[in-house]
Image: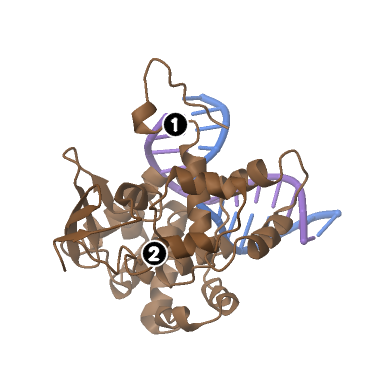
Chain colours: A brown, B blue, C purple
Amino acid sequence: MPDRINVSDFDLAATLECGQAFRWNREADGWFTGVVGQRRLRVRQAGNTLEGDVDPRYFALDVSLPKIIATFPDDPALSGAVANHRGLRVLRQEPWETLASFIASSTKQIVQIRQIVAALADRFGEHDAFPAPDVIARATLPELATCKLGFRAKYLLAAAQAIDRGTLRLDKLPGMDYERAVEELTKLHGVGEKIAACTLLFSCGHDDAFPIDVWVERSLRRLYFPGQKITARQLRQFTRSHFGPYAGWAQQYLFFSERRRGRLPVAAADSSLASPRRP
DNA sequence: CTCCAGGTGGCGC
DNA sequence: GCGCCACATGGA
């Protein structure tokens, strides 16, 4: 793993803080520290230089972002979102940790998802690593409950057991058709279309997966269908036909822009003027 | 205190 | 199909 490389079309902060990963922290000195697999990583960006524990594959530095963006539809809504966070890349994360994290995510704020994932690693993992399926599979519901999972504890336990038993093969998902992979994941109780899409996008190379959560739905309605009566079904249909083969990347730009809406970029922030608005 | 959070499944229609 | 609602827990 190189410790210093030149990067273009990459924004480390946007990539780590856009909500796709839950185990990174920005330190006061500008370094980001996180846990990826069994490793604790420390990374920092200064201009076009990336230094520290740089894992090119994890950060998807082996793909051309301009080429991906070139596949996006040329509409003002998406162009604006891309302009807001140019350099954001979809990470290549580990499937089990990603599935588990998003099982924990339903009706939770991102801060709380981070707390749950950290608690699972702390309680069941070794050296801060996220615990493997077989470890969670042997846990009890009361033990899992100590990690603030609430009603999701039984979903996580069942998922871990399905994987441990071999009923669910996460390693097969990247090679499957998207629809087939969704079908496989949604056999799990507590895993619907949205959590399946997140797992497939963030950890299985399905770049066309387009998770629709409250934020993205809000963004789509506001930017593409203002004042119109559009059903959820119609929205899904629209996203499938409109955004192209890297729809998931487009989704992440829209998601992050919607979440940052009303909060100003650092350079323009002024506590006396900024009035954070909620939609 | 109330409201709501990167949803899902089960219900009634 | 669609519109409700419960589901645990805690941040704002």
Give SS at disc 1: loop
Q: Is residue A107 in view from this perspective?
A: no
Residue C4 in the image: state x and y as whole percent.
71, 45
Horizontal placement of A115 versus A222: left or right?
Answer: left
Horizontal placement of A28 versus A222: left or right?
Answer: left
Circle 2 residue: A98
Circle 1 residue: A263
Q: Pinpoint the chain carrying mark 1.
A: A
Cα–Cα gap, marks 2 and 1: 27 Å
Instruction: Please identify the quarter of the rendering in which residue A236 is found.
Output: bottom right
Picture layout, residue A259 above or below residue A54: above
Picture layout, residue A117 above or below residue A125: above
Instruction: Please identify the quarter of the rendering in which residue A168 is found.
Output: bottom left
Residue at 43% x, 52% y is: A150
Picture layout, residue A66 above or below residue A27: below
Q: Pinpoint the chain carrying mark 2.
A: A
Q: Nearer the viewer, mark 2 or mark 1?
A: 1
Residue A38 in the image: state x and y as whole percent.
20, 67
Residue A64 in the image: state x and y as whole percent.
39, 66
Mark 2 surroundings: few (<14), some (14-19) or many (≥20) residues within 10 A: many
Tell me which numbered mark, 2 or 1, is placed earlier along the sequence.
2
Residue at 55% x, 59% y is: A211
Residue at 37% x, 21% y is: A270
Give SS at disc 2: helix
